Amino acid sequence: WLEEQNFLERKVIVRGDSQLVIKQMFSYWRIKKGSYAKVARQAKQKRRRFSSMVGNWIPRKKNMVCDRLSKR
């Protein structure tokens, strides 16, 4: 969707409550093996298409409303 909206050259901030996803997506942690590894590598590869994309981890305890909505 971001590509279709021509966001490749804009600053994009990805916020998420999964520390694992954010840290792996933005190369702070390695992607090891597991059922998610293939998808994680694909997402990381897509991230490289953007000129300015950063990740921001938000702990669940600081994001309770969104956490509840995601479980609906």
Image: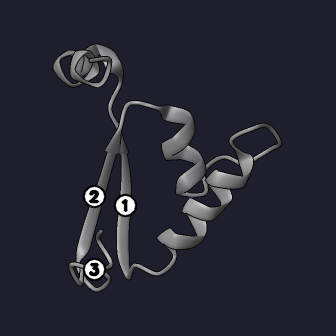
Q: Residue furthest front?
A: 72
Say left or right for 31 vs 61.
Answer: right
**Residue 41 x, y percent position in the rendering:** 67, 59
Which of the two marks, 3 or 2, is nearer to us in this view? 3
Q: Amino acid at mark 1?
A: Val
Direction from residue 20 to residue 38 in the image, left or right: right
In the depicted structure, whether residue 16 falls above or below residue 67: below
Q: How many numbered circles does the render carry?
A: 3
Which amino acid type corresponds to the residue marked 3 in the rendered image? Glu
Q: Label 1: which residue?
A: 54
Q: CA distance from mark 1 to mark 3?
A: 19 Å
Q: Tell me how far mark 3 sits from mark 2, CA to CA.
A: 17 Å
Q: Position of residue 31 (x, y in %)?
A: 73, 48
Residue at coordinates 29% horizontally, 71% vertically from top-left?
Answer: 2
Tag 2's secondary structure?
strand
- Circle 2 residue: 13
Label placed on residue 4: 3
